[in-house]
Amino acid sequence: MSNQVRKFPEGFLWGGAIAANQAEGSWNVDGKGLSTADVAIFKKGLSKSDYKKHNKVDEEQIQQAMRADTAEGYPKRRGVDFYHRYPEDMALFKEMGLKTLRVSIAWTRIFPNGDEEEPNE
């Protein structure tokens, strides 16, 4: 092993990434439709490693989620509310020295029902 110190090249772009289903929030704002993340129910007492039980959703749970008008019990409906907080979040990214950010947008925000002729602006 060499004792030579390796450095990132001049102009290297440090960055980060966030996913809409974890960060966006605002599940019922500005015409957004329900996504699979929006029907994910918090299941207290399950082992963190029990992936199948955490992600199993049946028709009744979907119907219940469609009737629910709150984020209570639906943690991905809140996210970190990047939808409303992006200006201050971007300022924090800049303060940390990040130069790039990959952001996803929920398709259900663009096409709320999935069969629209025109995108939801």
Image: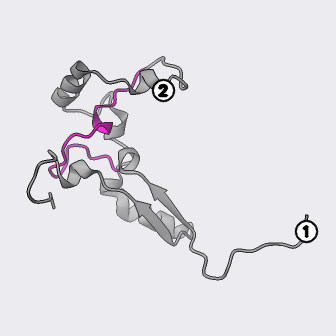
Up-down relation of residue 109 to residue 11 (above or below) = above
The residue lying at 8 percent from left, 57 percent from top is 117
List x then y, in percent, for residue 11: 60, 81
List x then y, in percent, for residue 16: 51, 61
The residue identified by callout 1 is 2
96 or 52: which is nearer to us?
A: 52
Residue 80 as seen in the image, left or right of residue 111: right
Q: Which residues are magenta?
A: 24-43
Residue 10 as seen in the image, left or right of residue 85: right
Q: Where residue 51 is drawn, which disc sits there?
A: 2
**Disc 1 element:** loop
Q: Is residue 28 magenta?
A: yes
Up-down relation of residue 11 to residue 82 (above or below) = below
Q: Amino acid at mark 1?
A: Ser
List x then y, in percent, for residue 15: 53, 66
Mark 1–mark 2 Cα distance, whole angstroms, equals 43 Å
The N terminus sits in image quarter: bottom right
Q: Amino acid at mark 2?
A: Tyr
Crowdedness near tag 1: few (<14), some (14–19) or many (≥20) residues, C-alpha within 10 Å: few
